[in-house]
Every structure is written in C-alpha cells, then in structure tokens.
Image: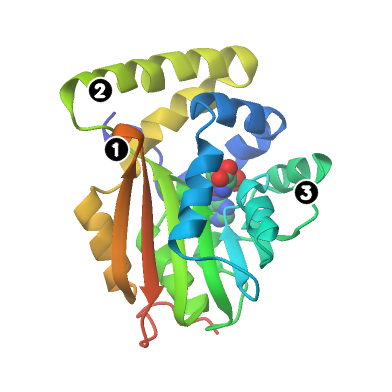
Amino acid sequence: MALGDLPSGEEKRVRVREMFDRIAPRYDALNRVMSVGMDQRWRRRALDKIAVGPGDLVVDLACGTGDFCGLVEERGAEVIGVDFALRMLKQGRSRGLDSRSVQGDGEWLPFRSGSVDVVTCGFALRNFVSLGGVMNQIARILKPGGRAALIDVDRPTWGPVRVAHSLYFDRIIPLVGGLVSDRKAYRYLPQSTAYLPPPDQLREMMSAAGFLEVGRESLFLGSAQILTGVRGPLAPLGGALS
Ligand SMILES: C[S@@+](CC[C@H](N)C(=O)[O-])C[C@H]1O[C@@H](n2cnc3c(N)ncnc32)[C@H](O)[C@@H]1O
C-alpha cells in the first residue's frame, strides 16, 4: 500500500492509540498466531544481543501488554514499560504482569536524560508518527554506552518467500484478525509496514540519533528484524528534554 493512503501526523497518533485500545483484549493470543509463536524467541534474541542482565535499568518503549517486560525481569534487570494505550497496559496487568509501567508517548519519553541503561521496543517502530524523533528520545534517555534493541516486522525480499509471506501477512492475518478481533485494525497492521524505512535508512537514522555500533539482524527469512546500537558520548540533536 502507498503511504499516501495511510494516516500521518496527529491523525495517525490518535488512530493508532484508539486501535490498540480496541484490540487490547485479544492482542496477546493473536500476536502469537501472527508470528507463528516466534515473537518471544525474537524478543529473547534481542535481549541476548545487547546483553541485558542484573543491574540494568530498562525502559521498554511501546510495551503493550508487557511481553518484553516479563522477559527482562526474568534476567534480573529492572524494567519500566511505557505505552500510550491505557487498555494495553491494563491488559498486561490483568494477565498477571506486575512490572512498573507508565502511560506515555514515545515521542516525549517521561525520563531524565542519560538515566537508563537499556531501551527495548517491540513491533512498534512503524506506529510512531516521527521515527527519527523517537530515536532521538531513546538516545536522550540512555546513558552514554547504554544499549538499544528495536524489533519490528519486515518483508522478505526473495521472490518465492515474499509471495508466501504476503499471502499469510496480507490475506490470512486480516481474515483471522477480523474474525477474532477487529477487521479494520488487522487490515491496517500489515499495511503499516509501508511506514518502515528500508534497512539502510533505519541504520542511518540510528546513527543520526547518536548511536554507535549500529547493527541489524534479519530474522526468519526476512519477516522480522532487530536493530541494535550503543549510545555514543554525544547528546542527540533535537532530543533536548531533560
Ligand atoms: C504491535 S504493539 C507491540 C506491543 C509490545 N511491544 C509487544 O512486543 O508485543 C505496538 C504498541 O505500540 C504502542 N504505541 C504506538 N505508538 C506509540 C507511541 N507514540 N507512544 C507509546 N506507545 C505507542 C501501541 O499502543 C501498542 O501497544
């Protein structure tokens, strides 16, 4: 889908928040189905890549119902989840997650500059209004030397896999999501991959936000990706809240 058909600016922010509030009750079950059960493995892989462990203060940005938060705590690190959709946070609580969480927007993260060791973010990059602005915010709240791991979906590039993936992602997921949850939302979710910049541009955006050692790993034949980086010594431009 062309970007021109998708919402932008404030309209996108409002629609995305309303959509996640609407689908919160069935989000977890459908998430597992959509990723064929691999989403938790990908989150663990992301935490391994940036060596999250005891002593780390982690902010899980766009935490949703808290899958990343639970895995971070299993490693003995402290975590604070942030999400702007209150019902996603409440859904996490109702299934027993007791990590600290706060309602907030990734584009104005409610943390002091240079105050956290790690930022994680699962499957939300394409939902932000300004991805560059969010990357600046992530860099701003990280201590110099702090690490970030950001996961999102991707589209395979190799022909036959691309076709099979598209059949599943663009047809079956909206169908199943529509039957079990919300038709409009599960049509939007695959379409929203159009917001994701190509790999080189994603890496450049992280570098521009002040990250060093920027890396990208492609997962499961190119259907998902993990971006990692280490916050450099310089404060990011445009991330001046303190
Ligand atoms: C696909 S869900 C992913 C949830 C969780 N990270 C996971 O791995 O399952 C995307 C989440 O991003 C949140 N989100 C989107 N834009 C946001 C923003 N600007 N600030 C905070 N949360 C946001 C949504 O409310 C939603 O919970």
> In the rendering, at what x and y percent does residue 206 appear?
32, 66
Quadrant that contains the C terminus: bottom right
Task: Return the residue nearer the eye: 143 or 242.
Answer: 143
**In the displayed structure image, the side of residue 66 where residue 16 appears, left or right:** left
> SS for tag 2?
helix
Q: Which residue is mark 2?
A: 161
Label 2 to label 1, Cα distance in Å? 23 Å
Task: Return the residue nearer the eye: 84 or 154.
Answer: 154
**In the displayed structure image, the side of residue 177 where residue 139 appears, left or right:** left
At 64% from the left and 32% from the top, the residue drawn is 27
> SS for tag 3?
loop
**In the displayed structure image, the side of residue 43 where residue 7 appears, left or right:** left
Q: Is residue 103 visible?
A: no
> In which image quadrant can residue 192 be found?
top left
- Mark 3 and mark 2 lie on one chain; the one further toward the N terminus is 3
Q: Which residue is mark 3?
A: 97
At 75% from the left and 40% from the top, the residue drawn is 91
Q: Which residue is mark 1?
A: 3
Label 1 to label 3, Cα distance in Å? 36 Å
Name above or below for residue 45 compared with residue 137: above
At 30% from the left and 33% from the top, the residue drawn is 221
Nearest to the eye among marks 1 and 3: give it. 3
Instruction: Check disc 2: other Cα within 10 Å, few if <14, some if 14-19, many if 20+.
Output: some
Name above or below for residue 226 compared with residue 75: above
> In which image quadrant can residue 21 be found?
top right
